[in-house]
Image: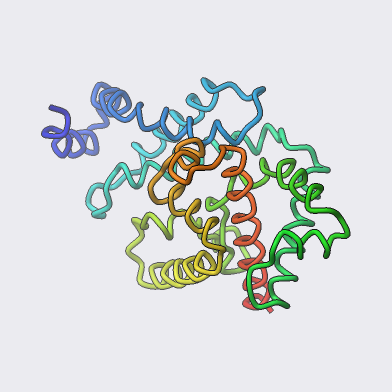
Amino acid sequence: MFKDREEGLWITYKKNSDLRIREELIINYAPMVKYIAGRIAVSVPPIVEFDDLVSYGILGLIDAIEKYDPNQGSKFKTYASSRIKGAILDQLRLLDWVPRTVRAKGRQLEGVYANLEYKLGRAATDEEIAQAMGITTDDLAQLLMDVSGTALVSLDDVWHIGDSEDDEVPIVDTIEGSSSQIPEAIMEREEVKRLLVDAINRLPQKEREVVALYYYEELTLKEIGEVLGVTESRISQLHTKAILRLRGYLSRLKQVFMG
């Protein structure tokens, strides 16, 4: 079985870069690529082909195989998962399939959540958000549907801990663990993880459940809907609101830290 041979395969591959071993690793982990692509597919418009998402993910898998260091102690599946997701999301950003006007609405809505919840000291209700924007709750529901695509990157957004691109910490790495053993980097990531956990704990219960089931249990939006007994579109709305709240809260913290 592959599992029984995996450790030996990694040792051999890292010594001589045998392409046959790399191919075996790719074939074994291909189902993980399809699974991750499937989870992302529910948040993108029909014009984005599922096969294209898989192709982007395979590139991420290959990159993970090349860069993975078995001696660091992290499991390859954990390490590769964030790289596969990152490769798919990077390609989607290049496609720029979300119109600028929608992105602008998303940023505006994120700002409203951040500012209002800072003033209230708690999660704002739909009615309060709608009132702050001068729209109806029905209009807000439509707006959340419109900007749902901008929440695609969600917890894969980065937390900037400095002024350069080298000081970016992928939030997903703070959840799944990092191969970095540098004490300063570990401390930074632990602090980000603490802040993210605090932000998640501030979410309303239903949104917190969606985040837990989607990112920790890795269920699809459809599966979460079945667990919680609501429609997939309702789960999508809850997910979008959760991400807007999280990004708004973290953006305010970044402003404080950056001065």
Could you tell me residue 238's position as x and y percent? Answer: 60, 50
Which residue does the image show at 41% across and 43% down from the upper left? Answer: 218
Which quarter of the figure has residue 180? bottom left
Q: Nearer the viewer, residue 116 or 193?
A: 116
Which residue is found at the position 76% from the left and 65% from the top?
Answer: 128
Question: Would you say 185 lies left or right of 44 here?
Answer: left
Task: Give the quarter of the image for residue 203.
Answer: bottom right
Residue 118 at what x, y percent from top left? 69, 75
Q: In the image, what residue occupies the spot 57% across and 44% down? A: 235
**Residue 178 left/right relative to 238:** left
Q: Residue at the far front: name it.
A: 229
Residue 92 % position (x, y): 62, 35
Q: Residue at x 74, y 41 (%)?
A: 146
Can you say whether 159 is above or below 84 in the image?
below
> Where's the C terminus, which quadrant?
bottom right
Indicate the position of residue 209 as horizontal and vertical percent values.
Answer: 47, 55
Q: In the rendered image, which quarter contains the N terminus?
A: top left
Going by the picture, which residue comes out furthest to the right? 134
In-front residue for pair 54/239: 239
Count of numbered circles in the view: 0
Of 30 and 160, the residue lying toward us: 30
- Model colouring: rainbow
The one of 131 and 97 positioned closer to us in this rendering:
131
